[in-house]
Amino acid sequence: MPYLIDGHNLIGQLPDISLDDPDDEAKLVQKLRGFAARTGKRCVVVFDSGLPGGQSRMSNQAVTVIFAAASHTNADRVIIERIHKIRDPANWTVVSSDNEVLKAARQHGMKTLRSAAFVKHLRKTATPPRDTAPDVHLSPDEVDEWLRLFGADDDD
């Protein structure tokens, strides 16, 4: 299930990225790449005010980055246009805080998720909790068995 994400709406909900940061978009893209790698999900993120607009070189196979052309549109319009062009809407989830965007997605049969709720998905880690780590303790008998199997001499 791919995600269509309103980038600046999501940044506004993140505690560790500020909309005032000149690198805010790049930092979000890095988070989305980690999310995509961890989950196997594809993401399309749309930001306002790109020059000249269109797909960014920050894109990779898992995360497509699009900037709305600053001169004549905005991210909300680009997202709504994309919503209407998606051929398999039931497989997509739209992430935004904008009610108009969320309404258009629901009307087109897409799942929706508010930006604040999606933040929780970004915070999940891929590392298992420490208490589920394998027990690597070997008993003295197991050590002796390994030494015997690999031909360790008693003189060593």
Image (cartoon, helix red, strand yellow):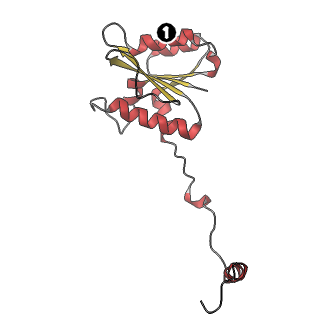
Residue 20 screen position, x and y as percent: 27, 30
Residue 28 screen position, x and y as percent: 40, 33
The answer, for residue 120, to whether it is visible in the render is no
Residue at mark 1: 81
- Would residue 59 be found to the left or right of residue 20 on screen? right
Residue 150 vertical placement versus 84 (above, below): below
Q: Residue at x 49, y 31 (%)?
A: 117
Q: Residue at x 34, y 36 (%)?
A: 17
Residue 154, located in which quarter of the rendered image?
bottom right
Residue 25, located in which quarter of the rendered image?
top left
- Would residue 57 be found to the left or right of residue 124 on screen? left
Which residue extends farthest top? 72
The answer, for residue 153, to whether it is visible in the render is yes
Residue 122 screen position, x and y as percent: 48, 37
Dot 1 amino acid type: Glu
Which residue extends farthest bottom? 155
Callout 1: SS: helix
Q: Residue at x 66, y 80 (%)?
A: 143
Residue 156 screen position, x and y as percent: 59, 89
Which quarter shows the N terminus?
A: top right
Residue 71, located in which quarter of the rendered image?
top left
